[in-house]
Image: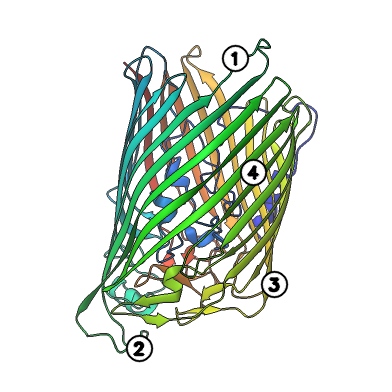
Amino acid sequence: MKPILPCLCLLFLFPAFGFSWVDSLKSPASPISQFQPPDRFNQTLLLGNAFTCDRMISPFQDDVLFLKPAGEYRFGIHAYSRFFNIKAPALDLDTNRGLSLISVLLGSKREQLLFLDHHQRISRRMSGKLSYNSIVSPGFLLNSFAVHRGFRISMDYSSAFFNSEIGFNYAKIESDENGGLKDGQVIDGISRSDYEQLQTFLSDDRRKIRQYRAFLNNEVVLLNPKSNDSSTSFSLKLHADGEWFRWGTSYSGTADTVFYEQVLLDTAVTQDTAGYAYVKFRPAVGLSWLSKLAELRLKGGYSIYYLDQLIDTVKTENNYTAPFLDLNVRYDCFDAQLKWSTVVSTRANDGDFSIVAQTAYRNSRSVFSQLELSYGKSELAPEASSVFYRSNHFAWENEFGKENFTWLKSSLGLFGNRLSFSMQWTEVMNYVYLNDRARPVQAPDKVKVLDAYMKSDVSFRKWRLMADVQWMNSDRGYIRIPEFGVYGRLSFRDHFFKKALFAEFGMAYYTRSAWKAYAFMPATGMNYLQSGQWVADSPVLDVFVNAVIGRATLTFMMQRLNDGMFGGENYLARGYPAAPKTIKFGLLWKLYN
């Protein structure tokens, strides 16, 4: 805990006199669903910085309570879903010109990120978007050496009575899940080949994942009467959305018969396959009433899923319906939301439901810019792969009861949310997790999780300090989280060469309290409990320079500058050390045509 103390002193030195609260380098909205607790620690994604995606947090640093609303399919076989959902930036589009965004990050042959995005106005009512990303990094995905490719294209048409959007997404990941070690690297006196055998229980294993999505969204205005009072409006709309989705993975690895107790193995390299696909139709009706002081929005409908699932050679079908209702009400600075959904099915997910209620006060002109209180409850069938799984490495068939989640969250934002506090209490019953043999079990008791955090973004003259401090606690050992974590970013910014160059010089510091984090099982792509190693008690220090020239931003960074200090390796999880220190160069460039 010693490295944490000086950082704490720095984070809480906020004298009132002379400080200003700034909007520059805002953090974008979290890509995580509101049904999921907040991201852990290093979540400050800086717009205008080429390292946006490189700062994405590892799944190992979550509390693993991934709470989807009722109706969304829970497959649960992989820990990669968030990496498939990297959002393309919302480019500001001029009505007469297209806009392209180039983002490049080069560190070494093992760490390269490339993002290309373009938004084009085709006609007065039609526009299109195109996005491509390529990520090669041992630190991006579970600290394995991973190659990630993504492609997205969409077009939308807007008019007074009809709006439509069509698009296609494709993404793939290929990873060598060997702990991220270089060929000649030695960890704790152990060579790469020995380390793979002793720490990851696998000598040579690879995973390939593919994800496809095609969608068509339509909105038709059924009723939009004109009013003599231009300050109010009323509309009734029909929504008709459709989606085709497919996800599949294959895994090959040399089995370790000591670790895998199933008699389904041979000594040669084996291959497992799994995946699912669905076609979804979502008809709905939306009603809205708007005025200068208040608004009411109500949307109700249902989703129809035609689902196919594959685990090894076992195929199943599951068709179900998921009704939903969304209500939003606002009056002046107060607003309230209610979201409800359920499932009608002939399978285990029949009767699943979730409800989220939220009320808030928001006023950007006040010192108290936001005060929010939210409540959520859901009852969901366990993830499909926890109930049934069959492969060359593992096999099980379980009869689990439904999981029950209840959470209550309060948050306070000050000075335009530049300083914010939040606390969330979560209670879980019948929680399904993977034990120390990497097999699913259901807990017979309740578990309570408490999560509190403070975030700040404060400037004093040319200095800027950003911080994210979190405290967490779980009263049961099968939900594991570090008790404390902190991310701090201190920088100096100024103009040079007669204001032709704007530059930022800074450092970023990140650490957590030591904890017995989850281990990763490559054969299933799941996290499981382990008690053999404390993880991530070493701090991480980065230094960087950002230089803005015109519309281009150049970034230079030395990541993990203190590699090897403070007691040795910094492990992301059991058997997965963080990558060594790396010099990186980044470019972010907006181009107009």
Looking at numbered disc 4 in the image, what kind of residue is underneath it? Ala
10 Å neighbourhood of mark 1: few (<14), some, or many (≥20)? few
Residue 337 seen in the figure:
yes
Image quarter hosting the C terminus: top left
Q: Name the mark nearer the viewer: 1 or 2.
A: 1
Residue that numbered label 1 is attached to:
226
Looking at numbered disc 1 in the image, what kind of residue is underneath it? Lys
Residue that numbered label 3 is attached to:
475
Q: Name the mark nearer the viewer: 4 or 3.
A: 3
Q: Earlier in the sequence, mark 3 or mark 2?
A: 2
Q: Name the mark nearer the viewer: 2 or 4.
A: 2
Residue 133 seen in the figure:
no
* Separation of residues labelled 4 and 1 (CA atoms): 49 Å
Looking at numbered disc 3 in the image, what kind of residue is underneath it? Asp
Residue at the left extreme, as displayed:
268
123 up-or-down from 566: above or below: above
Residue that numbered label 2 is attached to:
258
Residue 444 percent across, percent down from the top left: 63, 80
Residue 539 percent across, percent down from the top left: 56, 57
Snapshot quadrant of residue 210: bottom left
Residue at disc 4, secondary structure: strand
The answer to the question of whether label 2 and label 4 lie on touching residues, with beta carbons closer than 8 A, is: no
Q: Earlier in the sequence, mark 3 or mark 1?
A: 1
Q: Earlier in the sequence, mark 2 or mark 4?
A: 2
10 Å neighbourhood of mark 3: few (<14), some, or many (≥20)? few
Residue that numbered label 4 is attached to:
467
